[in-house]
Image (cartoon, helix red, strand yellow):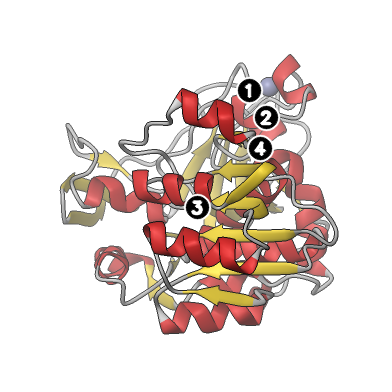
Amino acid sequence: MRGTMIYAPGDVRFETVDDPKILHPTDAIIRTAVTCVCGSDLWPYRGAEPIGDPHPMGHEYVGFVEEVGSEVTSVRPGQFVVGSFATSDNTCANCRNGFPSNCLHREFMSTCQAEYVRIPNAGGTLVALDETPDESLWPSLLALSDVMGTGWWAAEAAEVRSGSTAVVVGDGAVGLSGVIAAKEMGAERIIAMSRHESRQKLALALGATDIVTERGEEGVARIKEMTGGIGADSVLECVGTAQAMSQALHSTRPGGSVGFVGVPHDVAVDGQELFFSHVGLRGGPAPVRRYLPDLIERVLSGRIDPGKVFDLTLPLAEVAEGYKAMDERRAIKTLLAP
Ligand SMILES: [Zn+2]
């Protein structure tokens, strides 16, 4: 089959690779329906993470089950499935406690920008739909495998409540998904921090009520101005840089919470400052598998449409251009169709 490999910063290739095989009785093989490029794929692409030997890329997927291992009973060949970027058995203590993305048997997906994908822990990881959904819904279902689940987790971790004020730091696909989640959780005011006009428009269309274009200390001052001088109840940090984290912590009111879901790069939190701020802080890889049944239902019923975060669709073979377009900020998120 053909799949995506990264060789060096800026060097992504679509080439012939080994066909995935069932390695464990708990594995499944799926045929990719659609996949995509994640903002976090840009860290190695931009040289912000070491690459080492050439390796496959991609952790978001929806597809059709091709083959299952002997111990996989919850899905069968032919079914359309959605799964998380982190696999989970759905039975261990961490899974039962609601944190499947910290499953004791977790494996992070990393080969999904390909025609076929091996899914470890398939029985716990994959959720099969009753029937193959209309193709128009595939982008939104694909978004559930990472960005929409991650935005949901940002809102949950930031303790968004009905009637509250939520600030979203970051206008990428996760930030925009965070806007959707905050709206679904009943936030009355949703302030999106964005400097890009097309993304501001999309944030407003998805449920944001206000836009703040300032960043850093000016951005914090603006949020305070809008929140009676104290800061917001909930702040969703969806970037992962030191500046974004600082902006998030300083925009939160005493007693409020920050949910941070951008993979931290050079982020340090000052213990003294956190102590005296009374701000709650929680983040990490989103427990996507826990959310899937609910989020799938919201997509199928038309309640949410997170597929809107895809503003570029390319054939999978043109994956390199998909990375380039996102790196150059010509695209928010690239959808790839085999
Ligand atoms: Zn588990």
Queried on whether the Cβ of the residue with tag 1 lies below 8 angstroms from ligand 1, the answer reads yes
Mark 2 or mark 3, earlier in chain: 2
CA separation in Å, label 1 and label 2: 5 Å
CA separation in Å, label 3 and label 4: 15 Å
Relative side of 47 to 116, left or right: left
- Foreground mark, 1 or 4, reads 4
Mark 1 or mark 4, earlier in chain: 1
- Foreground mark, 3 or 1, reads 3
Mark 3 or mark 4, earlier in chain: 3
CA separation in Å, label 1 and label 4: 10 Å
- Label 2 secondary element: helix
Residue holding disc 3: 238
**Contact between labelled residues 2 and 1, with CB atoms less than 8 Å apart:** yes
Give the vertical position of 117 relative to 123 (above or below).
Answer: below
Residue holding disc 4: 287
CA separation in Å, label 2 and label 4: 5 Å
Mark 1: amino acid: Cys
Residue 226 place in picture, x, y as percent:
62, 68
